Image (tube, rainbow, N blue to C red):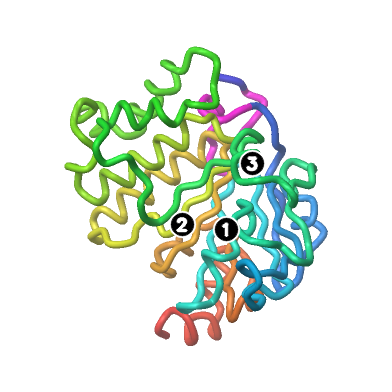
Amino acid sequence: MSDAYQDDRGNKDRSITRPGGGSARPVAKGGHASPAEASAFLVGEAMTGGYGKGPDILHDCTIAVDPGEIAVIVGPNGAGKSTAMKAMFGMLDVRQGRVLLDGEDITALTPQDRVVRGMGFVPQTQNIFTTMTVEENLEMGAFIRRDDFRNTMAQVYDLFPILKDKRNQAAGELSGGQRQQVAVGRALMTQPKVLMLDEPTAGVSPIVMDELFDRIIEVARTGIPILMVEQNARQALEIADKAYVLVQGANAHTGTGKELLADAEVRRSFLGG
């Protein structure tokens, strides 16, 4: 374990992540990109775009995250939250703006090429191979690797002990929360430089949601930047180092999770008072 990295939670473990990145940078409050955001480890900068030949869904939208941070995207239904994440992963056209990963412009790269560059993406649905065992799912996550990945698998099992117990069971037989753990674990098998989660707690009970959030915090403690879209806005903001509220595909509020939880307008409009 290297002492070169330490986040504000006091953790120095980079064992799962690849080398690279830098220290966390503060985010400026407001709708537009700050200098800190523009130089972040992963940034979708001033993104405008949509699907195919359809209308723009994103409008000058900026999302950023740095190593060791949990950045969350929240907002009402239809606000463009998942669309913003998919744009950063290359799943729709960014007609204006750009996406940068560790200083490299990756706007023109395919999702497959972004995975090779170090982006791990966990979609909300259809994110596991249901007929394969848990361990086979994790092995599939290591498809881009040519080294011995057994140590990474052991780390995933340490993070999600229930998966080790069920490693020979078909993933489709697991509970919803356990399936999400398989999906996150498979993404971690790529040794990502950044992990992107689309609605990781969708459809799970409050107890399971709390457990998943605890595991997400543990992943962030390894130094991996985490970008997460989440409908459970209040709970997500409670663990967020950086947070973005989107409305109609544009930045409406930006700040730390604590700042947005304390913002009267955010509470009234998006958190039920």
How packed mark 1 is, by other alpha carbons closer than 10 Å (few <14, some 14-19, many 20 or more), is some
Side of 128 where 52 appears, left or right: right
Q: CA separation, marks 1 and 3?
A: 12 Å
Residue under the image location 53 percent in, 41 percent down: 120
In reply to whether residue 8 is colored magenta, the answer given is yes
Q: Nearer the viewer, mark 1 or mark 2?
A: 1
**Kind of residue indicated by mark 3:** Arg
**Kind of residue indicated by mark 1:** Lys
Tell which residue pokes out farthest to the front in this image.
53
Quarter of the rendering containing residue 86:
bottom right
The residue that mark 2 highlights is 198
Side of 57 where 120 appears, left or right: left
Which quarter of the rendering shows the C terminus? bottom left
Element type where label 2 sits in the image: strand
Q: Dominant secondary structure of the magenta stretch?
A: loop
In reply to whether residue 231 is colored magenta, the answer given is no
Residue under the image location 35 percent in, 51 percent down: 126
The residue that mark 1 highlights is 86
Q: Which numbered disc flags the more N-terminal residue, 1 or 3?
A: 1
* Magenta stretch in the rendered image: 3-18
The residue that mark 3 highlights is 114
Where does the image place residue 92, in percent across and percent down from the top left?
62, 60
